[in-house]
Amino acid sequence: MNEDLIYNAVGRLVPSEINGELVVPFMGVGKYRPEGTKHASVIPTNADYPADGNKQVASLKEALVKAGLKDGMTISTHHHFRDGDLVANMVFDVVKELGVKDIRWYPSASFPCHAHLIPYLEDGTISHIEGSMNGPLGRFCSEGKMKKTAVLRSHGGRYQAVQDGEVKIDIAVIGAACADPFGNANGLNGPSASGLLGFALADSQYADKVVVVTDNMVPFPCVPWQIQGNYVDYTVEVEKIGIPEKIVSGTTQITKSPDRLLIAEMTAKFCEATGIIRDGFSFQAGAGGTALSIGIYFGEIMRRKGIKARFARGGSNKYLVEMLEEGLVEYILDGQTFDLEGVRSMRDNPNHTWTSPFTSYNYHSKGNFAGLVDVVILGATEVDVNFNANVVTHSDGRLLHGLGGWQNCLFSKTVILPVPLFRDRIPVIVDEVTTLCGPGELIDVIATERGIAINPLRKDLIEKAKDSGLPIRTIEELKEEAERICGKPKKPVFTDKIIAAIKWVDGTVIDVVRQVEEKKTEN
Amino acid sequence: MTATAGNRGDSVRSDCFVQITKTEHQATEIRLQSKVESLYGDSIRELCHEVLVHYNLRNVFVEIEDKGALPFVTAARLESAIRQLTGTEESFSLPIETRSLHRTRRDRTRRTRLYLPGNNPKLMLNAGIYGSDGIILDLEDSVAPDKKVEARLLVRNALRAVDFGDAERMVRINQLPAGLEDLDYIIPEQVNLILIPKCENAQQIVQVEERIEKILGQENTDIYLMPIIENALGVVNAYEIASASPNVAALAIGLEDYTADLGAQRTAEGRESFYARSAVVNAARAAGVQPIDSVFSEIDDMDALRNNVLESKALGFAGMGCIHPRQVPVINEGFSPDEQEIEKAKRIVEAFEQAREKGLGVVALGSKMIDAPVVKRAVHTIELAIQSGKLSTNWREKS
């Protein structure tokens, strides 16, 4: 394996085969043409399902056994419960108990709570993970301990992979805050409320077997049915599917860091000066401290100018909800709710709409919402002088984050990455990113505390920002300043072993992560 | 024998902790544990070797716990530990960062000066980007008594290595006499202004001046002084303090200590310090130096800060201290002239220039005669407006 390496369209050396399956190297944005038809699961018949609609079984174990769990299968879960998720851990406790091996775990993302699964990765219960990997699992994978190669996909790429049949899910286990015995489910009501269940949509539509797990079983009908029971094979009631305080953080905090506030303020000023903030515009600002502050500055500008936004893309939180309720934003198109205010608003306000990776992000479809957004504010661990950016590894080469919806959001009309010039001596603006997750042609503006760099491709923005009084610099100047302050960094040394592949939104391989060579301490 | 320097702990960033032990072996051993090992591990070890060679130290065991410290920090920590270990008073100097070196003027605008704890490198790195007129590397109240010596070295290195942008480079020394010794480390390192805390008589200014000239080996012509009045006696002697040297550029008041000295409580309305603030403004103006107000400690309350600045400006103060970067824009704005003031100043300056061109001895604006001090104030307002970005330098062409 890995012997057949090819340079892809962004100059990254990638294999033509991953985990024994052929893959297509990245060919350029919009260049790969998919062929054939979408994946289809087997045709079920009502004759095989209870006439009274009651699909409830006694336990998760019974559900998995009835679903035909066996060695080498793919099990999927979603991450709406974030670090409060108990479902994935519960599922693999059962898999382990049944002695089943070599499962491919296909989560929409993993969190530190999933460190529980590390022994199962070690003993072969789980062969590998395909999904965004954070924290301890990223570390485990970085150390080359996973038996097969990890595959990282964006939220849209995950939907695409399932839809295209690239990943065939044998059993989808969908945790839901509320469900009925037929399998209708939502994330709105109950102790483990997570707002919506959009990340599980593809799983419900395309998996061979679908199991809905809830700790809040209600009589039919469970409405609204964000997950339609018509896709569901079995339903299970358990005592607890999530830890509420870890599902939604009651206190999403605006940053107090003066550097980040400065970056946020400069980003907002840039959007005002270049006319991005205008009546009827749309934006997406994430849930990180800097992004939150940018949303607040946007609000101040809109109030001052007496204008409003047509829609905002969530991750929603109380600040975005306040803007909706104040009338500064007409609609929230939400991908996940980050706090209880978001859940409440989604439940009560028809203008707070839930979305899915299908509506928002799927690249193999007839368009998606991400491209309709005027401006998105995203993060990055590194950006290089060609505006390529990295979100999954750190400059020391270790895999520590997932892709989330990041790649998908790059299709917005203007992409701004507000990042510090350096973090604890580690330059963020570099010669060449450690891992290339997004090509520079889609990344428009880098806003740092020491200046804003505009992609030369965006002549319109360069022209509009000219007399703004903002510190506009070239990306090379920013890189040089970072190196002048921090010193020129050495590059980490990698072995040949590929530990993870990074997929682009169309399923092609944009980059890989190699294992870091551990340096011996020398005297 | 073991010596340590620097800071350690989970919340520490951009700093390192150094421990040096004398050993019986002839060989030097360096053990580095760093967050940035793969990027800068080699360069940290090289720097460490360089410092050890400089001090001709061989038989030592050096342990460095690094949290992303820049070289000027690591060098200061190593030097500090070596000084303790060997008793040497020799310095290890890094190259000077020349970008932010600039001379300053006695009458430079000093609306804002940002306090930076002298033993905390993290806050120093970006201090120059918030737009304050000055940055103060503080050796006094923000440094724990047992960290005074290592703070001196860190501040000295920061003055050499950190780009503070356009900000005036200030250091607050310790209360005399300890502060005099601080000067030995600071004066040779491109400092622009020295803050002298708890100043209560003119003699202290003279002492500082004498020490500075001794260090420089010549007359002091461009390191300015800002005495801080912090007790009742200082208020009484404010004028003699402000006029004790031509290098005194500003006179500041510190209200926390002052109210304690009075035996009064510091209140929001500040009636207990009204006399002292006015006395300091009056003494400063009489001596021809800038009166500078105390810091405002409620860092989360921007509205209260705004009111405080308005009152301060109304009393005659020209600037304030900042204890958080977020305070900078609010205070800068407050001490900058507003639109009305700028318009009026423009008319006065234009009238003055026209009168001068025509060779007229008397300046008139409409039917009103304008005195020289009014013109002077207008010129100052225009300068301030330009500095705060409220007026373009070529305002004459535009109007």
Image: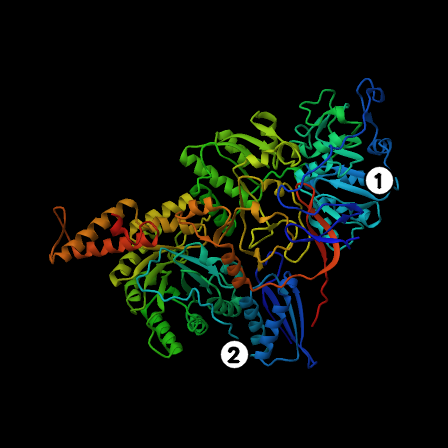
Give the total number of marks visible in the rendering: 2
Left or right of B80: which side holds A82? right
For the point 51% across and 74% down, the residue is: B93
Residue at which label 2 appears: B90
Left or right of A176: which side holds A355? left
For the point 20% across and 54% down, the residue is: B374
Chain hosting mark 2: B
Q: Is residue A229 visible?
A: yes
For the point 37% across and 72% down, the residue is: B208
**Do callouts 2 and 1 mark residues in contact (Cβ within 8 Å)?**
no
Instruction: Give residue B377's position: percent from left, percent from top.
Output: 23, 55
**Coloration of the structure image:** rainbow
Residue at which label 1 appears: A95
The amino acid at mark 2 is Glu
Q: Secondary structure at mark 2?
A: loop
Q: Is residue B157 above or below residue B355?
A: below
Chain hosting mark 1: A
Instruction: Say which of A170 and A438 sits in front.
Output: A438
Left or right of A302: which side holds B366? left
Instruction: Give residue A311's position: percent from left, percent from top.
Output: 53, 32
The answer to which image quadrant residue B254 occupies is: bottom left
